Image (cartoon, grey):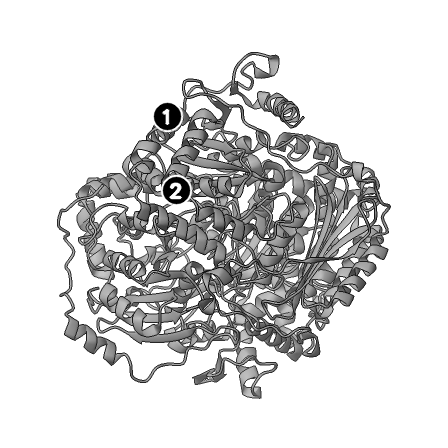
Amino acid sequence: NLRIISSTKTPHQATTMARGPRYTLSTKATTLFVLGALFVPSVSFLPPALRLSKPLPANGISSANHKARNPSILTSIRADDNSRENVDFKASSRLSKIQNTNDDPDSTARRQIILSLLSASSLAPFAANAIGGTDSASLVKSAPIVTADVANAAIASTEGETVKVLKPPLDKRAYETYELPNGLKVLLCSDPTSTTAAAGMNVHVGACSDPKEVPGLAHFCEHMLFLGTEKYPVEDSFSKFLSSNGGINNAFTDSEKTVYYFEMDGSIDNRFSEALLRFGSFFSCPLFTESATGRELNAIDSENSKNLQSDVFRLYELEKDRVNSDHPYAKFFTGNKSTLLEGTKRQGINLRQELVKFYEKYYSANHMSLAVVAPQSISQLKEFVLEAFGEIPNREVNPPEDNWAFLIPPYVEGKSLVPAYKHLVEIVPIQELRQVTITWPVVFKSKEERDDYRLNKPNYFVSGLLGHEGSGSLLSHLKEKGWANALGASDNADLSDFVTFEVTVELTNKGLEAIDDVCESVFSYVRMLRESPIPDYVFEENLQLDDLEWRFTTKGQPGNYVQSLVTAMDKYPPSLYVAGPRRLVLKETKSTIISSDEPRSAFESTEQLDIIKNSCNDLISRLTVENSFLTVFSKTFEGKTSKVEKWYGTEYNVRPIPVSTLMRWENSPLAQSIGLTYPRKNVFIPSEKGLRLKKRVKPADPTMLSFEEKMKPITPPTIIRDDGKEGRWTVYFKQDDRFGQPKAFLIFQLLTGELYSSPLKASLALLYQTCAADLLNEYTYDAGLAGLSYSFQVLPRGARLTFGGYNDKLKEFASYVSSKLARDLNDVLPNSDDEFERYRDNLLRALAAFKVKQPYAHAIYYSGLAQQPRNFEYTNEELVNAMKSTTRQQLIEYVKTIWARGKGDALIQGNYEKKEALDIVNTIDKTLNFKTISANQYPERLKALPIPVTTAREDPVRIRTSEPNPSNNNAASQIMLQSLGTSEKDHVLIEIMSAIIEEPFFDELRTKQQLGYIVSSGIKAVEQTRTLSLIVQSNVAPAEKLTTSMLTFLDQVRKKYLEPLTSVDIELFVKGLVDRRLEPDKFLAVEVTRNWSEIANGRFQYDRLQAEVAALLTLSKNDILDFWDNLYGSERRMLVSEVVPRSGPATSKEPAVKNGYSDGTNTLLLGVGDIEKFRADREASRSVTMS
């Protein structure tokens, strides 16, 4: 789905700027990375490349979803979320620069980017549209119960001198950090303006602490903590409780930590207090029952099976194979049945006893960190926390890394499965990838050295230079040579005793043949860093931009925030729990850290600047040829490898890099001789004058608003220019009156039906978007660093330009980009057939990546096709075939038509006055200079195709397809129930239904039946239509079994889950949806998105949220029953989408390509070859209905 992103930060909400290593990517690569994140499946164990704090900007739920409800697959919607009409502000800057909340930056920014993997997998959205209980006693020892007197004394003991927690200037929340008597570190954040609460727990133990005999035990322990405690023995009772209170829970296992968290409605004190009690019991009295232990093994194995065809996991395992085999990082972290069941039996190990042993050894309060963000006061939260977490035993254990950090060297020649230094590993990828990565281990001698690295963040500065994309950059040079498409620089592995610093280059075919030359260029740039001092302005600009972002950082979702906080509590001193991951230059002197949270415009002293310079020089001194090793991904190695990795079956070669090549790199050319230079000064950094507000805004205090006041609609945009239906522009404008930030968004759309009217034109549109973004990148890169963003999209209803960021230089930025896109076409088109082929090759590889997506994604893709008109969604095959036939001349001719004619709609919103807004539109109008069209030439709006009605005794529409990837042995099935109702009541009723069945569905099919790791339900919107969607992916059960199990569940919904509903149950579900709608917007971008959706959809219902709240407040139990009887009974519009693997336990009869539907046979069983005819028939049916 498309969505708007704040210009200064990132999507799926947006991530606060990482103050650690960052990725510096080209515009195209950044955009693709953002899109690719949408398709990262929820997993509880993630390798670094996928361990994103928030890969789901659209709904703010982390990818590390222990319960595997996979919000990345199906997300509940808010208001009218039409994916074709939402805005996508993709920053032309780095991933690390697209940010706007307090979410976990370090964990986002430090992750390795597999550039071509992301490129290949992430363009597919254009083509695919994404695609109980027991009372048995625990073996765990419990701490004594805390009495009331002890509790009061404990609270009093925390009320002495407190540490000042540095926080952003706009963050008005109260913070307090302290320790409980049992040694648990606590950070409280009181936010009375919010109705949402969250808590996170970081247990300082991860997969590195797995016993050698039981790989995957830490991960398994994480799963098991959700399955019953002494106080709350019913399995999944915590998730059920959260579900009834509008909440979610999540967990993930990392190398050295395991993080658990939840988010819920926090407005009712006793409900939130109970949630904390339930959560706290995870860490004081888990049961680890025999039955749950046996069943949850299936979930672990299913999770591992899902990852077997992932290039990210495959690369990650080979990276660890290059580490000293005696070092804990070399272990297999995820685990599977082979290690946890068969392996333990073979060794005579009792798995449950091993779990308890692991828990009792490492789950100690003195190595845990708790963060709570909630509406309650600090004093009230203290009482809640002590009661819920005071019983966690303090085993007074030492940190796990004390047994190996700085004692066992991570890289030792001859002691790893795969050689590291001065060796090259050639890997056969699953996808069509081409990339080379140079890796430098940065090994620390002591904890003090490690802490200095974290506080000084030299990797941020160095990666910013190596990964810069402006004129004179390394990437610019590699592109000029025709060797590269994209480049990223960052830390990857991040452990107590070492990190790895990496440069990854996404290669062209020509670059793949010139890897030695590519690496030589990298070492030339490193030589410049070492021999030519980095200019002072580079450090100064980084600090200035960093604190500009700090100055305007606003709060995000509490669930994401607590993840960030508990992670930081493991890394930084208490005063830096918030600021540590979000700011640069954290030391005032060599021996002191910063003490002020005020924004800085310059270094405080020469000593402070020298600290950063020296730290950078130390890192640069480690980036030597001797200290490096290489990894190359390419399909050209297929059939030429001699080794197979143990856990994922990855085929690879390893060979020493020739001495002659090493010597050549040692003596790489001077940077100046090949055109490499330091970045020029950034002219886009806003001036202090430009940051002034045009209108003073006093944000309303939600705690002081009555319900009636909250129900008042937000002031909508007004029309400030209306040239008539057949005129040039209709311009909507709203000056910011709520957020008080010097930012704005500009959206310009030219309505025309000519640009997307065939697969060929859609392919040419993709080509133009790709090459224009790439060729504009040297200009837009610095703008992105300075908080400006832009996006150019060709959509089924026309072309759209969006701009956002600090308004100081936004007009000039928008004018320049628009001029290049509409007038100076030679500057944004490939100037040779070779360059054209580079762009086309990128897109063809991206489209080819569709075949190796997960089966659940394929099921979603085909069901989505069946609901989309053919001219709004072309098939992957259609786009591939069309892309292959495109030529450079066709592209040139096509681009001339983009701005030729149409009707203009614009929205200007933010820190502008009306006169300025009109002036901006006039400037863009002169640039685009299009001809007008008549009203009858307006393109058709998106309308969902109606699924045929079938009775309970009839077979529904069923799409059966073979899994395109023959190596993936997982089956998947999706059931969709379509509601054509367009009223607010219809929309909120289907959301209520989704909330009611979510937890029981997961509990029944995942926890009890153990059908698969991925079990998910949710709502999807196509224009005014809503569908309730359920999906399961399994490596043990065939698609038919999955479908049958889901249908059996649905058959029982009325009797088991609806009829027993009490008025209190309904009120809780309603309250959750009401609070979500009345929660004040946190970002200008959110309001802009909603306003543009209403404008683009032509409905202009700016009070939609309030109207839906009004509908919610009228709901009764009979309304819910009647709605279900209609949705699943009299008006059952059901579609089943099944994906059948070609091998493995989940396989079944191979589906036919065609089942006769396309030939006129009276059947609703469809093969891939029948979908086109089905769509045509549904379009005809819709036309008849409308007429």
Residue with the mark numbered 1: 1044
Question: Of 708 and 1067, which appears nearest the observer?
Answer: 708
Q: Is 53 placed left or right of 865 in the picture?
A: left
Q: Is 212 placed left or right of 489 in the picture?
A: left
Residue pictured at 19% horizontal, 73% vertical: 151
Residue with the mark numbered 2: 1116
Residue pictured at 57% horizontal, 43% vertical: 121
Q: Is 9 placed left or right of 682 in the picture?
A: left
Q: Residues within 10 Å of mark 2 (few under 14, many from 20)?
A: few
- The image quadrant of residue 662 is bottom right
Across and down, in percent, residue 1130 comes to 45, 25
Q: Secondary structure at mark 1?
A: helix
Across and down, in percent, residue 538 comes to 64, 75
- The image quadrant of residue 293 is top left
Q: Quadrant of the N terminus?
A: top right
Q: Secondary structure at mark 2?
A: loop
Q: Residues within 10 Å of mark 1 (few under 14, many from 20)?
A: few
